[in-house]
Image: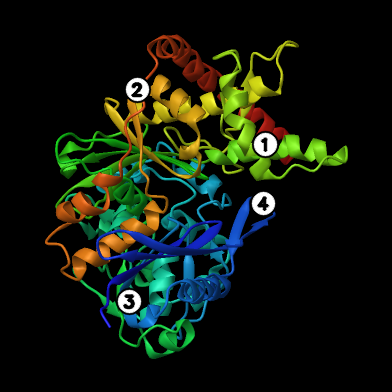
């Protein structure tokens, strides 16, 4: 039987997906399960590592029920997953603690203490990435202070996808994207001891696994993993780049003619532009954002990330649903979403300001402040729920512009993916705020597709990532949504007020944080 399927695994923060793609990029089937995590007092966010693996296995087996003879047809499996965080194992491959996720804010005080220091400057100079509490390096510092027993029992520090790759192959490795923006140098593309010295992590260097580029090196499915997943022993396994990069790749960020931007409107907001070389990266004056290796030549993604994106929409939607539920009216999230675009487009543009800093971890792009919190400004008795809903969407768009402007000129075209990309209202608002054409892709599972594209190139099905993109991504781009000039003019006048308001709010955020700490 012909091996004509590549399986893409995307282990996100809240959902694990297993997707079957034909070798030409056509999606055949998909299976998904929730990826459960818990909140810990003090701002922690943890995930059971074995449960994440078992749920991944269940997704693969669920996909096999949808695709006849999947084990015989699979040519390779590629894995990507949520970025940052710390997933620790011992010499025997057993987790030594629950995984600390990127959502974990317990190390925020460490970041606050490093702001403005020589160590921060040296790390940013090498990695092109700003210090924040999501980074594995910062979480290792926290563990050394708070849980030294866990570190002493550990032999390897993974990220999510690395853990799954280990369970699939038995190989301890990480990919170029997360290795370099955490511990590396954007010029050499190697882990740099100077970064570890600057942070005081020399002893923890033993935890960092080797870099494996899935474009060039394929692992093999182990006997134990073959037994658990039902796939063939020795199946080629590709370690994909971090989910941000995989999603951007699958959504079509690469353009042969003109550099495009890409915004992922998921739980977090990822706003990025593709640069051809490290020399083209525009440093942030505030030393924030990420510089991430991209699987095409010497190129990088320069990225600024809002800690919370659609989490803000989830909050305001669930807030309304909760009130209705208390009054005996049950409305599902799906039912509510059906009316969101009509509600938003029917409300007055720019009648309120909203800062979307709703995460307990504060904000990390284009500024880092663990005390930052969401807020409405300009509320009056005339405002109704639909005005609040529109203000939240506008806040997400203003936050995106804030991020793009920190990286230089806004690209003329932005490819948008993520759950909120299906909202016409969001596309209209985002295009007007950015003054850019907005394009979405008919590719629903961009992250899994980006991982699978890595495997397709590694298998030799395509000569390089450019030719793979020509078939897997570019043909699926939809017609662009052009920015509304009148709406864009209105938002242009409002954007400086949005930025000024977030600057002036910082003392209030910190006063609130201090007051809450004494309660």
Label 2 belongs to which residue? 482
3 and 1 marks in contact (CB < 8 Å): no
**Residue 155 vertical placement versus 84 (above, below):** below
Is any atom of residue 334 visible in this view?
A: yes
3 and 2 marks in contact (CB < 8 Å): no
Q: Nearer the viewer, residue 125 or 392?
A: 392
Occupied quadrant, residue 428: top left
Secondary structure under the numbered disc 2 in the rendered image: loop
Secondary structure under the numbered disc 4 in the rendered image: loop
Q: Which numbered dot is residue 317?
A: 1
Q: Nearer the viewer, mark 4 or mark 1?
A: 1
Mark 2 or 4 closer to N-term?
4
Mark 3 or 1 closer to N-term?
3
Which quadrant of the rendered structure holds the N terminus?
bottom left
4 and 3 marks in contact (CB < 8 Å): no
Q: Which numbered dot is residue 136?
A: none
Q: Is residue 331 left or right of residue 37?
A: right
Mark 2 or 1 closer to N-term?
1
Q: Nearer the viewer, residue 483 or 296?
A: 483
Mark 4 or 1 closer to N-term?
4
Label 2 and label 4: CA atoms lie apart by 44 Å
Residue in the picture at 62% in, 55% down: 44
- Residue at the farthest left position: 463
Residue 254 in the image, given as x and y percentages of width and height: 23, 44
Q: Is residue 392 left or right of residue 117?
A: right
Label 3 belongs to which residue? 74
Residue in the picture at 52% in, 38% down: 309
Label 4 and label 1: CA atoms lie apart by 26 Å
Q: Nearer the viewer, mark 3 or mark 1?
A: 3
Q: Nearer the viewer, mark 2 or mark 4?
A: 2
């Amino acid at each position: 039987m012909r091996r004509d399927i590549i399986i893409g695994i995307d282990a996100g923060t809240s959902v694990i997906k297993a997707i079957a793609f034909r070798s030409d990029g056509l999606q055949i089937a998909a299976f998904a399960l929730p990826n459960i995590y818990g909140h810990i007092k003090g701002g922690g966010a943890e995930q059971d590592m074995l449960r994440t693996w078992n749920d991944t296995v269940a997704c693969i087996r669920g996909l096999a029920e949808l695709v006849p003879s999947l084990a015989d047809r699979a040519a390779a499996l590629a894995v990507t997953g949520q970025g940052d965080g710390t997933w620790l194992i011992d010499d025997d491959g057993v987790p030594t603690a629950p995984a600390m996720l990127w959502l974990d804010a317990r190390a925020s005080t460490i970041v606050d203490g490093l702001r403005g220091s020589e160590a921060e400057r040296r790390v940013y100079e090498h990695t092109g990435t700003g210090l924040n509490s999501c980074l594995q390096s910062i979480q290792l510092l926290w563990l050394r202070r708070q849980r030294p027993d866990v570190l002493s029992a550990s032999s390897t520090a993974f990220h999510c996808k690395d853990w799954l790759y280990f369970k699939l192959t038995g190989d301890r490795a990480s990919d170029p994207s997360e290795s370099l923006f955490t511990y590396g140098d954007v010029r050499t593309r190697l882990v740099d001891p100077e970064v570890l010295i600057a942070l005081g992590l020399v002893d923890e260097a033993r935890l960092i696994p080797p870099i494996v580029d899935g474009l060039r090196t394929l692992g093999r499915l182990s006997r134990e993993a073959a037994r658990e997943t039902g796939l063939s022993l020795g199946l080629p396994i590709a370690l994909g780049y971090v989910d941000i990069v995989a999603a951007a790749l699958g959504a079509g960020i690469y353009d042969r003619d003109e550099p495009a931007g890409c915004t992922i409107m998921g739980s977090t907001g990822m706003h990025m532009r593709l640069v051809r070389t490290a020399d083209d990266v525009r440093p942030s004056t505030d030393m924030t954002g990420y510089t991430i290796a991209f699987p095409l030549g010497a190129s990088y993604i320069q990225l600024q990330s809002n800690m919370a994106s659609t989490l803000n929409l989830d909050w305001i939607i669930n807030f309304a649903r909760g009130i209705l539920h208390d009054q005996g009216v049950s409305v599902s999230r799906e039912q509510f979403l059906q009316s969101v675009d009509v509600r938003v487009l029917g409300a007055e543009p720019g009648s309120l300001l909203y800062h979307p800093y709703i995460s307990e971890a504060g904000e990390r792009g284009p500024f880092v402040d663990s005390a930052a919190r969401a807020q409405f400004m300009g509320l009056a008795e005339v405002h109704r729920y639909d005005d609040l809903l529109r203000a939240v969407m506008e806040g997400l768009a203003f936050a995106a512009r804030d991020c793009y402007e920190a990286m230089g000129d806004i690209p003329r075209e932005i490819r948008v993916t993520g759950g909120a990309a299906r909202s016409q209202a969001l596309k209209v608002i985002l295009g007007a705020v950015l003054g850019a054409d907005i394009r979405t892709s008919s590719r629903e599972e961009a992250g899994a597709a980006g991982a699978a594209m890595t495997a397709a190139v590694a298998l030799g099905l395509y000569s390089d990532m450019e030719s793979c993109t020509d078939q897997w991504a570019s043909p699926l781009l939809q017609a662009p949504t052009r920015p509304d000039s009148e709406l864009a003019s209105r938002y242009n006048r409002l954007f400086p007020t949005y930025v000024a308001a977030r600057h002036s709010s910082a003392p209030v955020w910190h006063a609130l944080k201090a007051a809450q700490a004494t309660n």
